[in-house]
């Protein structure tokens, strides 16, 4: 493989993208991918600069590029609202909209959610307590983020399954090669999600509660006007989509890292305060959102490459997070790394993940609770084989069969 | 390690003190200020300070050793 034809969508590359990342950083820090024509940026500093330069690198990437058939686009127009997430925009609109939502994600708010999160995580953790192998992805990572989001939005907990289904379908167009029939199916399910949310908005107008959907229907702009239906739908869709597979993979990959790195589990038992850095190191190394997009508003010159106006730039957070120029000894999970949390897994600056405090709380509580109940986590079955869902932007384990030793945890609890 | 806010860059966008009030506070001018002036000496404080630096829309927060 030469640098010039590195293709991050290639399943071979996706099995282990780290060699390709290193080659890109060292030899082609601005790399035009052969199949899509997107420009991949892979060094830490370059990504930081670009996310701070919305004038030249706009977030307003046309979502239309996701659907290839006119039938699917037309279905959206005829039956609902176009897929448009209001935060996928630039200042000043982005600033105004985001400022309206920030109050829902403050330290005080997050502290209020903690007991509920502990309860949800505790219930799922109990289901893992079997003396046989369990699939950590299916039994824990799948249900957790969407259960949490369902509760925060103010929807009935039992709806998390259907919401998970719609969310999984919603992101299908982000991977390549959907058939026209499949695109149509995505559009139909997308409209079902919109109708479900529209009903929920109606309910919240009638019966306001302390939840995110109520915030959406009650929010007023500086001039007193409410959010438009399109804006509320777009944000609700982005919240469920943004919270789902990302957190799911953050959890799964953290368990994989825990097992693969000898000594880490013992250290976390001895020094539970290190769980914070452990979680950041896992986010850094595995970047559940491997990359996101910007579009150039003018010709831009970077490392001797001219990116023409109107091109899609792919910010490869996962590559920047292993850049030796910023993280010494980058491939190592290091519980003493001082700048671990300066990673790009949540991006930076204006579009820095709105849900980051929630995702962090979820993953930290999950490991705090799991480690207090079980011990000696190890892979069950064929530990050497891992399978990832194909896709460019998200890194996603299909399954993770693990086992643990309850007796050891019980012994430690008695000794303590 | 300590957190520092560059007042020339800070525009009082509030992310730091809304999210990490044990380290950052709101000054009388509405801008961010450091309330934790001692060394950031736990993993929790270091991770929180760095998260704030990443989140700050203005890039106004830096960490110094
Ligand atoms: C310079 C080249 C390469 C570097 C720097 C590199 C680096 C790494 C690293 C650091 C990991 C550990 C996984 C992690 O940190 O999450 C890994 C895993 C792996 N690598 Fe590579 N690698 C390179 C080339 C290759 C090649 C050429 C292959 C095979 C075609 C390969 C196959 C794998 C596989 C199968 C895994 C396990 C993936 C998993 O855990 O799911 N790597 N690689
Ligand atoms: C480990 C879990 C998560 C990861 C890795 C992640 C990653 C990201 C990244 C990288 C961005 C920035 C995109 C860019 O700069 O182009 C982002 C934005 C966003 N995320 Fe997350 N996210 C996670 C969890 C969540 C959760 C739980 C929510 C729930 C509310 C959420 C909601 C959002 C929203 C609304 C944005 C858009 C912010 C904006 O554009 O202003 N995310 N996320
Ligand atoms: S987040 Fe940045 S801009 Fe906002 S108050 Fe803090 S330092 Fe100032």
Image (spheres, coloured by chain):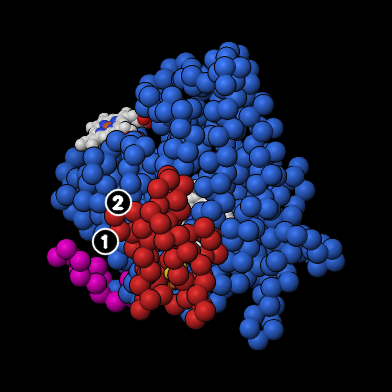
Residue at image coords 41%, 31%: A257
State whether residue A251 is above or below residue A149.
above
Question: Residue A339: where, in percent of width, then height?
Answer: 33, 49
Q: What is the span of residues highlighted in magenta in the rendered image?
A: A288-308
Residue B4 figure quarter: bottom left
What tint does the image give chain A? blue
Please determine whether, in this image, residue A205 is positioned above or below residue A35.
Answer: below
Residue under numbered circle 2:
A320
Query: Which label is found at residue A46?
Result: 1
A155 to the left or right of A231: right
Q: Which chain is red?
A: B
A67, above or below A414, in the image: below
Q: Mark 2 and mark 1 in contact? Answer it, CB < 8 Å.
A: yes
Is B54 on the left-hand or right-hand side of A196? left
Image quarter hosting the C terminus of chain A: top right
State whether residue A231 appears in this view: yes
Residue situated furthest front in the rendering: B38
Badge 1 marks a residue whose secondary structure is helix
Residue A363 is situated, as x and y percent measured from the top left of the image, at 53, 41
Which percent across, then down, holds residue B15?
Answer: 50, 66
């Amino acid at each position: 493989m030469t640098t010039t034809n590195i293709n991050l969508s290639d399943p071979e590359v996706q099995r282990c993208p780290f060699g390709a990342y290193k080659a890109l950083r060292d030899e082609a820090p601005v790399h035009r991918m052969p199949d899509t024509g997107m420009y991949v940026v892979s060094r830490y500093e370059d990504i930081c600069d670009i996310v701070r330069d919305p004038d030249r690198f706009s977030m307003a990437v046309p979502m239309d590029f996701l659907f290839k058939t006119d039938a699917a686009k037309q279905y959206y127009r005829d039956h609902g609202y176009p897929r448009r997430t209001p935060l996928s925009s630039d200042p000043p609109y982005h600033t105004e909209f985001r400022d309206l939502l920030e109050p829902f994600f403050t330290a005080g708010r997050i502290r209020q959610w903690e007991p509920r999160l502990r309860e949800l995580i505790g219930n799922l953790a109990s289901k893992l307590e079997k003396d046989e192998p369990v699939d950590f992805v299916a039994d824990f990572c799948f249900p957790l983020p969407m259960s949490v989001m369902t509760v925060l939005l103010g929807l009935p907990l039992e709806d998390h399954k259907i919401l998970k289904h719609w969310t999984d379908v919603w992101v299908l167009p982000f991977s390549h090669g959907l058939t026209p029939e499949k695109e149509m199916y995505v559009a139909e399910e997308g409209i079902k999600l919109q109708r479900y949310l529209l009903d929920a908005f109606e309910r919240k107008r009638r019966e306001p509660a302390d939840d995110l959907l109520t915030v959406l229907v009650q929010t007023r702009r500086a001039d007193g006007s409410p959010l438009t239906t399109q804006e509320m739908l777009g944000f609700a869709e982005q919240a469920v989509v943004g919270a789902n597979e990302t957190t799911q993979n953050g959890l799964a990959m953290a368990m994989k890292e825990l097992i693969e790195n000898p000594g880490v589990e013992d250290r976390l038992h001895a020094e539970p305060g290190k769980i914070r850095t452990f979680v950041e190191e896992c986010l850094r190394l595995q970047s559940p959102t491997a990359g996101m997009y910007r579009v150039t508003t003018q010709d831009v010159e970077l490392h001797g490459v001219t990116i023409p106006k109107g091109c899609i730039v792919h910010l490869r957070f996962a590559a920047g997070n292993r850049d030796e120029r910023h993280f010494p000894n980058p491939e190592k999970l290091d519980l003493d790394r001082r700048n671990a949390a300066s990673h790009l897994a949540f991006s930076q600056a204006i579009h820095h993940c709105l849900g980051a405090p929630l995702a962090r709380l979820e993953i930290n509580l999950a490991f705090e609770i799991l480690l207090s109940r079980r011990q000696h986590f190890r892979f069950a079955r064929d530990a050497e084989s891992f399978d990832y869902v194909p896709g460019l932007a998200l890194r996603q384990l299909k399954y993770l069969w693990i086992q643990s030793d309850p007796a050891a945890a019980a012994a430690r609890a008695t000794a303590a | 390690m300590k957190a520092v806010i560059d007042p020339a860059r800070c525009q009082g966008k509030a992310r730091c003190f809304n999210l990490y009030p044990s380290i950052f506070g709101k000054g009388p001018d509405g801008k961010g200020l450091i309330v934790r002036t001692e060394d950031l000496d736990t993993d929790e404080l270091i991770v929180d300070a760095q998260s704030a630096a990443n989140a700050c829309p203005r890039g106004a927060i830096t960490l110094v050793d």
